[in-house]
Image (tube, rainbow, N blue to C red):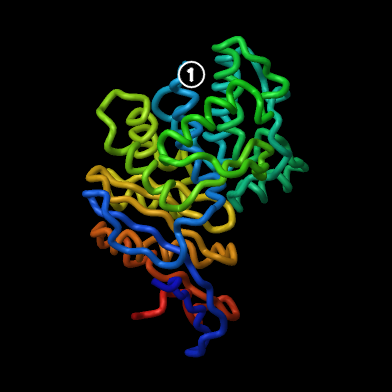
Amino acid sequence: MSEMVVEVVRSGFVESVHRARVHVIGADGAPVLVCGDTSSLASPRSAVKPLQALAMVRAGLPLEDELLALAAASHSGEPFHIDGVRKILAGAGLDETSLRCPEDLPLDEEERRRVLREHGDARRILMNCSGKHAAMLATCAVNGWPVDDYRHPGHPLQRAIRATVEELTGERVAATGVDGCGAPLFFVSMAGVTRAFRALTLAPAGTPERRVADAMRAHPEWTSGTTRAENLLMRAVPGLLVKSGAEAFDAFADAEGRAGAVKIVDGGGRARVPVTVAALRAAGIDAPELAGLATAPLFGGGVPVGEVRVRPT
């Protein structure tokens, strides 16, 4: 099937379009919607974080509940996120000077303004991947692995993560790149990412897979932020697991094994959530609250004058 089309409508005119690749499977694992080439290599970016967290739990990462959710997060830099990162580091006998993610400002606009207003500056702990990096350091500490080069693809931690990605996707990693946070980025297909998310939510209770999935689903504001779409989606649909990635990638699965992956081809983030809602509905996952996320408002002069929407078929 051709790629899904997303329209940017301003004052009644289609001003721009985005195209999306979508791979959705039903509870039986069979495809129910495939748009575009979802078998070719994709860059899931931070959507792979649940698999990275899984590999760390298997390697002895001693986190539960909110802090385990934070280990799989692209957090907004809200105060509770930063406090959680400090707790993970302190538990490993480390502090934020050990982090090797880039310096950044919070994703949350209010927190970003507060940091700048108080004469703050970009810091590693404020970067949205600092929870994952703190967990990586904690995993190294538990195993006696070196902490200075934990991002190197040849490090025992990264080898374990790669093996976990290959196991759950059912694919060999075809290429390794560098993610925005400096950690290795493993290229697999969208179909493989979909299989991996399904495996997380269908695993027996108490397994490392379910521990990660259950922590994220119980504490979705810790994996993203209080105002972020992933939090809103998981709050709207009990049992739903959603994780976003940079360049407009989303992956999801529910308790019945319905799962999917979404990639906006040009990386246009404004199209991501409407397409994800369409993918959820194609899988048979819906809730009244999703209606407000099926389109994104477009503004002119501070008032709504249009929307970003999936083109009706």
Q: Nearer the viewer, residue 23 or 129?
A: 23
Could you tell me residue 70's position as x and y percent?
49, 33
Q: Nearer the viewer, residue 311 or 299?
A: 311
Residue found at x 53% / y 49%: 44
**Which quarter of the picture shows residue 140?**
top right
Name the quadrant of the C terminus. Answer: bottom left
Q: Is residue 70 left or right of residue 258?
A: right
- Residue most extreme to the bottom: 12
- Residue most extreme to the top: 144
Q: Is residue 232 left or right of residue 77?
A: left
Could you tell me residue 124's position as x and y percent?
70, 35
- Badge 1, how many Cα within 10 Å: few under 14, some, many 20+? some
Residue found at x 63% / y 45%: 106
Query: Mark 1 highlights which residue?
Result: 59
Could you tell me residue 58's position as x and y percent?
44, 21
Residue found at x 58% / y 14%: 92
Q: Is residue 138 left or right of residue 233?
A: right
Q: Is residue 124 left or right of residue 53?
A: right
Could you tell me residue 151's position as x and y percent?
67, 29
Name the quadrant of the N terminus. Answer: bottom left
Task: Note whether 282 is above or below 109 in the view shown.
Answer: below
Task: Note whether 70 is above or below 276 in the view shown.
Answer: above
User: Disc 1 residue type?
Assistant: Ala
Q: Nearer the viewer, residue 270 or 205?
A: 205
Residue found at x 71% / y 30%: 100
Q: Secondary structure at mark 1?
A: loop
